[in-house]
Image (cartoon, grey):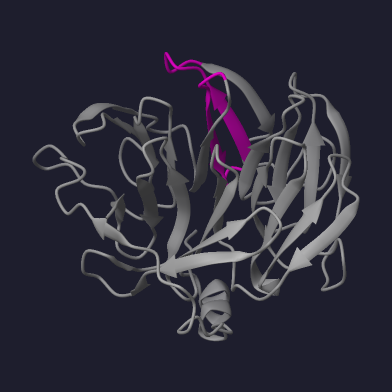
Amino acid sequence: MSETTTAIGQIYQNARIVDGSKWPRLNYKPDPLWPRLPDNTTFEETPGIAVDSREHAYVFHRGENPLMEFAPDGTLRRAWGNRMFVWPHSVKLDPEGNIWAVDGGGHMIVKIDPAGQVRMVLGRKQTPGETEENFNQPTDVGFGPHGDIYVTDGYGNSRVVRYTKEGRFINAWGRKGTGPGEFDMPHSVVVDRTGRVYIGDRENYRIQVFTREGEYITQWDQYGSPWGMCITPDDYLFMCDGHANRVVKLTLDGKLEGTFGVPGKMPGEFGYAHQIAVAPSGNIYIAEIVNWRVQKFIPR
């Protein structure tokens, strides 16, 4: 299974690129020396990146040892996860520092504590479905200020599923479509400090905003296709658009702050920018599918 299978490749071919040529430009420079991978070690397709408060970066990729932790200087600290996952898709960190690995091909989300031990599994491995306990190719996970867990169940299903902190089902919403509260590949989810839920509705080229319970509030459909999103402590939303291969910075009321990035393979360019993380320092990390890498960007 791959992001570049025929069906999904057709979606990419038909992408509606939003013109951002007149948007304000954000000023970041790539760090071409990050990370410092050991000899004979590499990523493969790289869909996932998360960064903790110490600026340790957690990379989730589709090769050997799919989970890798890097120190701030890019040194590899540890690597693990062989045979755990079928098709890595995204990775997030919760407020307690637990690692949540979203396995789209395995139809599950795995919670791993900082010591590397599995503490919870949502979904059943290689058992697709659309129930309280089963997903069909989930895409992302997010965490609310009340402890709620939100899963975008996005490739096979078109819904958002909400659980308690203990993993008990609360509710779900969404179906395939273009109307408010409907989705065409819900691909990413973040939650702000007030509990509002932001869903990256990727193939509808919009971010939809909901209450904690899943009631529709509004949508922003002028900024492109949200593949990955994160919210910073100073209340900005960053998204990466893998169709246009750029980063977009927004306020939490949907106002544009700026953008950077173009398609390509050189430092500072992107090939299917898939997930984004912003460190407390302001450094930005982007995981790319096609280029098999994570790039680090430093504010100028």
Q: Residue at x 59, y 74 (%)?
A: 224
Residue 43 picture location, percent across and down: 27, 48
Q: Residue at x 48, y 67 (%)?
A: 258
151 vs 240, nearest the viewer: 240
Q: Nearer the viewer, residue 138 or 30?
A: 30
- The boundaries of the magenta stretch are 96-117
Residue 159 lies in the magenta stretch: no
Q: Is residue 161 left or right of residue 80?
A: right
Quick check: 53 above or below 293? above
Res. 205 image quadrant: bottom right
Reply above or below: 246 against 161: below
Measured from the top left, where is residue 210 in percent x and y?
82, 51
Vertical relation: 115 (above or below) 6? above
Q: Is residue 52 above or below residue 190?
A: above
User: Which percent across, then down, holds residue 112?
Assistant: 52, 22
Q: Determine if residue 154 is in view.
A: no
Apparent side of residue 54 relative to residue 174 in the rendered image (left or right): left
Residue 298 seen in the current view: yes
| Circle count | 0
Q: Quadrant of the C terminus?
A: bottom left
Which quarter of the picture shows residue 204?
A: bottom right
- Pick the residue in front: 201 or 144: 144
Q: Position of residue 231 (x, y in %)?
A: 57, 45
Report the residue at 17% width, 42% height from top.
Answer: 41
